[in-house]
Image (cartoon, helix red, strand yellow):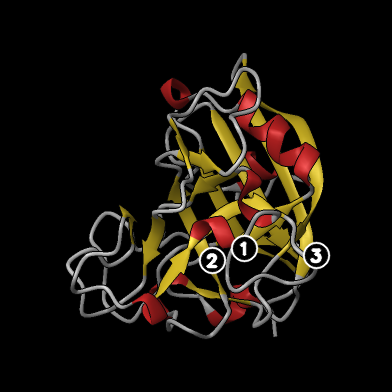
Amino acid sequence: MRLGLVLASVLLTLAPVDGAPLPARMADTGGGTQLITAVAPHAGATTGTVTWWDRRGGRWVRTGTARARFGAGGLVEGARRVQGTSTTPAGLYDLPYAFGIEPAPPRTGHAYRRVTRASWWCQDNRSRAYNRWVEGLPADCRAAEAEHLIDHRAQYAHALVVGFNYARPVRGRGAGIFLHVDGRGPTAGCVSVPKGAMARILAWARPERRPHIAIGTDGGKTAVVRY
């Protein structure tokens, strides 16, 4: 079943323009002039395509593309996601900042945080730091319910934080969704791309141009949802 059929209540309406680039067929691209689309062939897929776009002269132009990996549980509407299901949240999200174990690639535009041995991402629903980077675990964030970022040297060589459940976190919905470098297989809910593609994306993205990421499915007619 196509994700677009499941998510009829929040599905972005696509303009019926044959041959138009994907962003031009979306009702909302976040209001900026840069956009990343992460598209899977169907809701149960764990692979697909990431494309990054620039708006130039009133038109969306494809700037780059790469193969993508999604969560082992496929894709699900962001508002219905449950933590621990290894699903990638479909929707339209901002990209608050970048981080990495390795130095920022040349020309990186986003604020870039270096991972240290004290860097964790708190996923403890009981913690005041839920879905936040912390340097040293707070007393209310259990290590078993947090991700030690430096332990994932391949995946977090470079990454962008995806603003899913970030501005106003809902407990139990999920934490720590990123666009990051590929590991060995599907992700735990993030979107991943090859390392070279991640470096190109970081060099391309400019915060002043308000880039967003749209995650969704393509069943012959692309369905991208916003959470």
Q: Nearer the viewer, mark 3 or mark 1?
A: 1
Q: Rounded to the nearest whole Å, what is the CA distance between mark 1 and mark 2?
A: 5 Å
Looking at the rendered structure, the secondary structure element under dot 3 is: loop
Q: Rounded to the nearest whole Å, what is the CA distance between mark 2 and mark 3?
A: 17 Å
> Cβ–Cβ below 8 Å for labels 1 and 2?
yes
Looking at the rendered structure, the secondary structure element under dot 1 is: strand
On the image, the x and y values in percent for residue 169 come to 26, 65
Q: Which residue is mark 2?
A: 90
User: Neighbour class for label 2 at 10 Å: few (<14), some, many (≥20)?
Assistant: many
Given the image, on which type of amino acid does mark 1 rest?
Answer: Gly
As drawn, is 184 to the left or to the right of 211? right
Q: Residue at x 78, y 61 (%)?
A: 48
Residue 19 appears in view: no
**Image height of 173 relative to 196, above or below:** below
Quarter of the image where the N terminus is located: bottom right
On the image, the x and y values in percent for residue 105 come to 65, 27
Given the image, on which type of amino acid does mark 3 rest?
Answer: Gly
**Image height of 95 relative to 190, above or below:** above
Q: Which residue is mark 3?
A: 220
Q: Which residue is mark 1?
A: 216
Q: Residue at x 55, y 42 (%)?
A: 100
On the image, the x and y values in percent for residue 3 come to 62, 76
Quick one: 123 or 170, which is closer to the camera?
123
Pick whichever of labels 1 and 2 is earlier in the sequence. 2
Q: Residue at x 59, y 63 (%)?
A: 190
Pick whichever of labels 2 and 3 is earlier in the sequence. 2
